Image (cartoon, grey):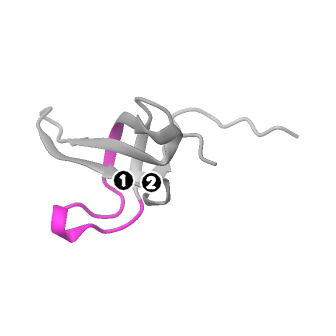
Amino acid sequence: MNNFKLFDVVALTTDLPEENLFSGQVGTIVEVYNDGEAFEVEFVDKDGHTYGLLTLRPDQLMLLHYEPVKIAA
């Protein structure tokens, strides 16, 4: 099970050269399918232009954190 949810910021963990997307590129989850079996992720440049919008599996994504992560002891 994953912890991704709508509007999470994620990084791509695999290269997708056919989509001109590569590991490390950052996107936002804009749709969740089948209770998290897949996610629609939008990739936007610094000017706000979408350069990628595709459906990805959870194993192709890594959640990005902008605050310290609290781990339950």
Instruction: Report the amino acid beneath label 1.
Output: Leu
Residue, disc 1: 56
Seen as rendered, the residue at the extreme front is 34
Task: Point out residue 53 in the picture as x, y percentages from the top left corner.
Answer: 21, 45
Q: Who's the residue at 59% across and 46% down the image?
A: 2
* Disc assigned to residue 61: 2
Instruction: Name the kind of residue labelled 2 in the image.
Output: Leu
Decide if residue 21 is on the left or right side of residue 4. left
Q: Is residue 17 magenta?
A: yes
Residue in the foreground of this view, choosing between 37 and 44: 37
Tell me, for residue 20, which label it has, or none: none
Range shown magenta: 13-29
Q: From the viewer's perspective, is residue 22 above or below residue 45?
A: below
Disc 1 on helix, strand or loop?
strand
Q: As drawn, which residue projects farthest toward the right?
A: 73
Q: CA distance from mark 1 to mark 2?
A: 8 Å
At 40% from the left and 51% from the top, the residue drawn is: 11
Tell me the SS state at disc 2: strand
Q: Earlier in the sequence, mark 1 or mark 2?
A: 1
Q: Residues within 10 Å of mark 1 (few under 14, many from 20)?
A: some
Could you classify mark 2 by the number of other residues whose Cα lies within 10 Å: few (under 14), some (14-19), or many (20 or more)?
many
What is the quadrant of the C terminus in the image?
top right
Where 56 falls versus 73 (above or below)? below
The answer to whether marks 1 and 2 mark residues whose Cβ atoms lie closer than 8 Å is yes
Res 27 quadrant in image: top left
| Image position of 54 (left or right of 1) | left
Give the x, y percent position of residue 7. 40, 29
How many labels, in total?
2
Q: Is residue 8 magenta?
A: no
Q: Position of residue 63 (x, y in %)?
A: 50, 45
Residue at 59% x, 40% y is 3
